[in-house]
Amino acid sequence: MIGVVRHVYERYGFEPLETPAFENIETLLGKYGDEGNKLIFKILKRGEHEGSGEADLALRYDLTVPLARVIAQYQNELPRFFKRYQIQPVWRADRPARGRFREFYQCDIDAIGSTSPVVEAELIIAVCEILTRLGFQGFSLRLNHRVVLHGLLTAAGLAVSQHNDALVALDKLDKIGVDGVAREFATRGIDPAATNKCLELFESTGAEGSGDTLGRLEKIVPPGDPALANLREIVTLVETTASACRIRVDPSLARGLSYYTGAIMEAAVPDLAGSIGGGGRYDNLIGMFLGREVPACGFSLGLERIIVVMTERNMFPDSVEHGALDVMVTLWNGESRADALALAADLRRAGLRVEVYPDADKLGKQFKYASTRNVPFVAVVGDDERGRGEVTIKDLRSGTQQSVARAGTAAELAKILKND
């Protein structure tokens, strides 16, 4: 899966980047909102300061804030437009549940340096290509804009001071439903009348077609609103591509992280509470480190959550389910170890995935082990084969075997595997 993600990201011009597992705690605090701050794993001061209970470092909560720190630190060494991908684990002090982990991999792409809607469009198209290649069908890419969302909250009668609380609750809409959001609003002190008006607005503006939804939003937000125009531009750009059928403007999409400033996105699959990835524009985040605004936009796929969904829905192909080896080289006796390793090296140079059995056990035992590893072929070089300059290839799936010249073993195996 990481190979698929990496291949697509690189085809879109993104370069790899890695950052340390931990950052200075000041780098992370205050970037994710109050709820995010509570989920940061803090690292106690070491040595004589350990007893103080104070923390000076923390495990990274996501890959976006560390990127912002890198951009600020190396601003003079980076190109005007910097596109990077990062596939590394992050940590959150959360309660584990289905598809939710304390340590998990994020697969991020971010584009720095441009406010153009082309950036959002390319992120959406790249993510849609990844999900299509992984075998997802019927998925959608939900799209909204934080400024439009704030406009809807204001139109519903919520005070600006209540917007962040409302966004945190709305971010859980697909998990806890409308009634759950209404209860969250109540616990956060939001007026019931404003709550009802807010949820009615989201219901009335939501539609299957992005054009219909945009048209309804235009009747609520001020005419010529630049945020709504930005949404329309993104939709128009994506609709010129194969991803057109995937995009869906969803006014209720909130994204709980507080650093988003513009368009926000989530990848949703049918019959799944929650998303398998999301992102958006965060033009102010790098400025927290740099002292000036730097336009930025990104998207993150949750690797483990995708694996959970694909496993539950039997989406992995047989070639993945059955293992990642092409052939196992047997060990005839203790004196043939070097010869077995030499044969394995020849096969690997030809691009085959090879394992060498480490002990000189009976062949039946070695074949049985290969079967448990789902290896389709076994290469045997006994005393007789070695004398003839041959290798016996046994197909464990059919039980057939053939002898081939030692020098042609890799080519023969490659031909068989290609025809399978």
Image (spheres, rainbow, N blue to C red):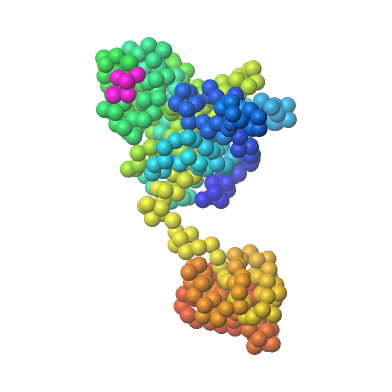
Q: Is the magenta region chiefly helix, strand or loop?
A: helix
Q: Position of residue 256 (x, y in %)?
A: 44, 27
Q: Residue furthest right?
A: 77
State whether residue 276 is above or below residue 57. Answer: below
Q: Nearer the viewer, residue 162 or 117?
A: 162
Question: Does residue 119 appear anywhere in the picture?
Answer: no
* Residue at the image point whose x is 50% and y is 22% from the top: 261
Q: Can residue 186 be found in the magenta stretch? A: yes
The tally of labels here is 0
Q: Position of residue 203 (x, y in %)?
A: 29, 25
Task: Tell whether 16 sits left or right of 303.
Answer: right
State whether residue 132 is above or below residue 34. Answer: below
Rendering quarter of residue 192:
top left
* Residue at the image point whose x is 52% and y is 27% from the top: 281
* Residue at the image point whose x is 65% and y is 20% from the top: 290
State whether residue 33 is above or below residue 267. Answer: above
Q: Can residue 353 be found in the magenta stretch? A: no
Q: Nearer the viewer, residue 365 or 389?
A: 365
Q: Position of residue 33 (x, y in %)?
A: 48, 23
Question: Does residue 10 appear anywhere in the picture?
Answer: yes
Rendering quarter of residue 10:
top right
* Residue at the image point whose x is 51% and y is 31% from the top: 40
Q: Position of residue 86 (x, y in %)?
A: 59, 40
Q: Nearer the viewer, residue 362 or 377?
A: 362
State whether residue 214 is above or below residue 415. Answer: above
Q: Which residues are magenta?
A: 182-188
